[in-house]
Image: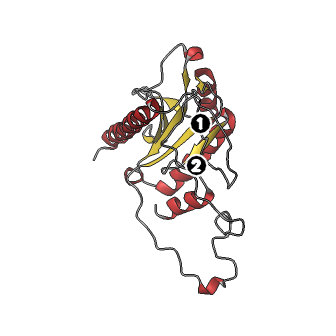
Amino acid sequence: MDKELLRIVIIATGLMIIMGMLTWSYLKNKRAQDDIDFYDELEFNGQPHNPLTLNDEKIDNVTKQPDINDDDHFYDRENITYQGEDDDDIEPTPRVSAPPIIQFSLIAKANEGFNGIDIVNAFGIVGLEYGSLKIYERLDENRLVDYGVACMTEPGTFPEKDMESFFTPGLVFFMQPSALDDPQAIFDDYIDTIKLLAIELDGIILDHHRKELTDQTIQSLRQCL
């Protein structure tokens, strides 16, 4: 398949996923009470009740982190072996196939969301470019798309002007590993870009399960590419 056609397929597929997610989230949010803060039930790093508000609505599609005991090995991200067991006794984690699309989200901590001017400036720092489909893209040396960034606000695109008055609750990042020549290298850039944008824009990264992104998840995904 022509790689330019793959570019359109990647972006179109990502937008379809985003639209489905937004529709589902919207229907859920309509039933939520206005006085429930965003992330009221979400626990990050085992610490309950770390409230982050987003447009004064509760985002129900962000799932709650599992309860973890203090002595559990779950957060030992640099060492995946169980405490008290020898490395030789640990069987390697079975290799799993890569998902068709790897999709992460960056959610604003501020109530008003991300401002358009801040987005443009941050995207300029990491080298993302505004594309013909009105989303931002990482382009390779041949000007072909490695991955895209869409807006969480319907219809998923960014305006071409008046960005100072534009706000969005979050950003959606997506890449299609099967369409890439070197998916691991591009995935590494993908992760570095999202992490830097999280710092620049003051946001929280959520993985494909709507949980806070961890190093363990990153390594699991990378190994399957």
Q: Is residue 54 above or below residue 9?
A: above
State the residue at coordinates (68%, 49%).
48
Q: Position of residue 24 (x, y in %)?
A: 39, 37
Is residue 139 among the parts visible in the rendering?
no
Q: Is residue 20 left or right of residue 162?
A: left
State the residue at coordinates (58%, 27%).
56
Residue tagged 2:
191
Q: Position of residue 39 (x, y in %)?
A: 60, 41
Pick the front one: 103 or 63: 63
Could you tell which of marks 2 and 1 lies nearer the N-terminus?
1
Residue tagged 1:
38
Q: Is residue 175 above or below residue 162?
A: below
- Circle 1 residues within 10 Å: few <14, some 14–19, many ≥20: many
| Mark seen at residue 85 | none
Pick the front one: 133 or 49: 49
Q: Residue furthest left?
A: 1
The image quarter containing residue 16 is top left
Q: Position of residue 210 (x, y in %)?
A: 51, 47
State the residue at coordinates (69%, 77%).
83
